[in-house]
Amino acid sequence: MKTEICYRANVRTTLVLNDDLYREVKVLAASRGVTATSLVEEGLREVLRRYRLQDAPSLPMFEQLSEVQQAIDLNDGAALRALLDDHASIVK
């Protein structure tokens, strides 16, 4: 029997921060009862999340469905396949 041990290591690094920003981080962290490190991690995660959202493709939004869209029953697989087959030449 083989046993594998998995663990996550934290990376230690040095950041150079503006003194006023660092003081704000320390005050906010203390008021929330967390470490400055956890607050900085939270902020970095939020910034990265925003960038990922910006890179996500935007999908069109429709106020009203067209007549064709209204006629399509997404719950009817056979009808969908037939519709796609009928329009396959347009896609090619």
Image: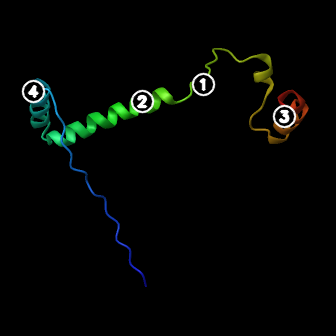
Q: Position of 75 compared to 36: left or right?
A: right
Residue density around tag 3, few if under 14, some if 14–19, many if 20 or more, within 10 Å: few
Q: Residues at badges 3 and 1 in contact (C-beta under 8 Å)?
A: no
In this figure, what is the number of numbered marks? 4
Which corner quadrant of the image does residue 29 belong to?
A: top left
What is the spatial separation of the Cα atoms under label 4 and label 2, in whole angstroms? 26 Å
CA distance for labels 4 and 3:
62 Å
Image: 39 above or below 64: below
Residue matched to label 2: 51
Q: Which residue is mark 1?
A: 59
Q: Secondary structure at mark 2?
A: helix
Nearer the viewer's eye, disc 4 or disc 1? 4
Horizontal and vertical percent position of residue 33: 12, 40
Report which residue position mark 3 lands on.
84
Residue 3 image-quadrant placement: bottom left
Identify whether 62 is placed above or below 34. Answer: above
The CA distance from mark 2 to mark 3 is 36 Å
Alpha-carbon span between mark 4 and mark 1: 42 Å
Q: Which residue is mark 4?
A: 19
Task: Determine the residue located farthest toward the bottom in the rendered image.
Answer: 1
- Marks 4 and 2 close (CB-CB < 8 Å): no
Q: Amino acid at mark 2?
A: Tyr
SS class, disc 1: loop
